[in-house]
Image (cartoon, coloured by chain):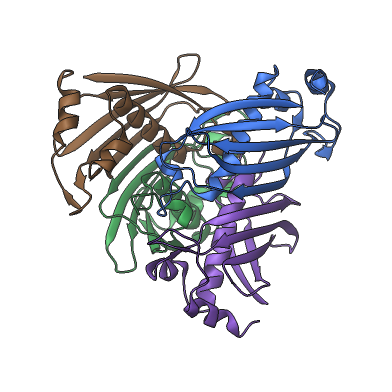
Chain colours: A blue, B purple, C green, D brown
Amino acid sequence: MYTHEHKVRIRYAETDQMGYCYYGNYPQFYEIGRVETLRSIGTSYKEIEKKGFILPVANLTAKYLKPALYDDLITIKTIVKNKPTVKIEFDYEIYNEKGELLNIGYTKLVFVNNQTMRPCFCPDFLTNLFAKYF
Amino acid sequence: MYTHEHKVRIRYAETDQMGYCYYGNYPQFYEIGRVETLRSIGTSYKEIEKKGFILPVANLTAKYLKPALYDDLITIKTIVKNKPTVKIEFDYEIYNEKGELLNIGYTKLVFVNNQTMRPCFCPDFLTNLFAKYF
Amino acid sequence: MYTHEHKVRIRYAETDQMGYCYYGNYPQFYEIGRVETLRSIGTSYKEIEKKGFILPVANLTAKYLKPALYDDLITIKTIVKNKPTVKIEFDYEIYNEKGELLNIGYTKLVFVNNQTMRPCFCPDFLTNLFAKYF
Amino acid sequence: MYTHEHKVRIRYAETDQMGYCYYGNYPQFYEIGRVETLRSIGTSYKEIEKKGFILPVANLTAKYLKPALYDDLITIKTIVKNKPTVKIEFDYEIYNEKGELLNIGYTKLVFVNNQTMRPCFCPDFLTNLFAKYF
């Protein structure tokens, strides 16, 4: 298992007239969570694309417990429970500054070769970077 | 059961460098789907808020089958399978112009009284508008 | 001169906690305005890209007179005052359903060859489509 | 004059199929710039709203020199050249990690009393915080 935390502040642009952070912004927070997780193990999503792979999202789940509010400095906790194969799964927990759990998310992404645009296995360099955690 | 279809065109703003409609935009399409569904039965989400209720999203799921692309005129099919109670559930199917199913979504929203900010039952006027379909 | 009007409805996602349509969404409305203007004269921005050109925005101005509100069906009026050369300029006026002028915008876009990524002149097919209006 | 710098990373969500950071995202970067500027002098936009004022944007200008790209860690430099009166003006310069100037922006915001919804003068506490810089 591998866990990484990253903080991000809620933008005014991300609020809605209910005074909440709009529910449709959480997939962006999940993106930030997994991107910073990849950076923390020694690569980046940008590098993965440069090496010839894209990772489209296949499945998304989100559970909204409490609203994030304007200017909240939220913590995105990203958890990788399983070794990447043809897919990579990320779980997310989002907390506010009081430590309250606001949101639970999950995404499954698949590896695609960006030349053939066909599904493929997780590239070796990435498998190796994750190896020690599983 | 009640079903409604609404078309919307993919904006350049909604594409990403993968050339796909970014996965995080689908919750906005679901919002449009349910809002136009409410309008089609004779009310609107705006009116619901005016009458003292808000409907925050509690759960979201999305399954991405094929990408929506720039300038695609997608059809958002919204399905209400169950009578609203303390919650209202919407299922969504998104199709491109070739009729290909691109995406399947689901959201559960809860009724909240916007004075007390406490959960409440679906207001009568809305129950009545949905009544004939169940 | 060429003028085109297109209507779009303000999404909940586009509101902010001030209860206004967030100021940063107007460039998207301008994009919709110019894209539908191009479609109305017989081409599309998608087709322009397919033919080997991209049109990055070089300049943007916006003047906010009155807020657009949630669920407003706004009219985006797009005006092309000058024949395209190495650049194409669009002026915009945004109105609500009462006919009130909410916003005035302007964008200058430049033609770029997407192989060389260098500035170029407006392609002939597009010059010809605009010719009768100037 | 008062100047403040803040860094933010370009999200995948913010790219478009041109491979650029979409032009419509820059107003959000300007928002982040001015919000962090206010925080740096000892208040916050959130606090300003709590004290009874909102600051809608009246004018926006943006000049796009070079594209910001995916995963770029951009620096938003915010400059306040004039003491706030009934309005507050911010200038922005956005740089990439190589120090290249990508974008120049400007916004004018007006003070509005959020009870009367009428224009008003910059509140004293904010005037005082800015006083030593002018």
Vertical placement of A3 versus B70: above or below? above
Q: Nearer the viewer, residue A132 or D108?
A: A132
Callout count = 0
Q: Position of residue A41 (x, y in %)?
A: 70, 19
Give the side of residue D87 with respect to residue C76, left or right: left
Outermost residue, top direction? D98
Q: Is residue B70 visible?
A: no
Residue drawn 68% across and 77% down?
B1
Residue drawn 40% across and 44% down?
C24
Q: Nearer the viewer, residue A71 or B92?
A: A71
Vertical placement of D77 versus A21: above or below? above
Q: Place residue D71 in its image quadrant.
A: top right
Residue drawn 63% across and 59% down?
B107
Give the side of residue D102 with respect to residue A131, left or right: left
Q: Quadrant of the C terminus of chain A?
A: top right
Give the side of residue B84 with respect to residue D119, left or right: right
Q: Place residue C43 in its image quadrant.
A: bottom right
Q: Nearer the viewer, residue C119 or B19?
A: B19
Q: Nearer the viewer, residue C90 or D37?
A: D37
Give the side of residue C69 with respect to residue A65, left or right: left
Q: Position of residue D4 (x, y in %)?
A: 33, 20
Residue drawn 75% across and 60% down?
B100
Q: Position of residue D57 (x, y in %)?
A: 28, 43
Q: Quadrant of the N terminus of chain A?
A: top right
Q: Position of residue A7 (x, y in %)?
A: 53, 28
Q: Is residue A84 visible?
A: yes
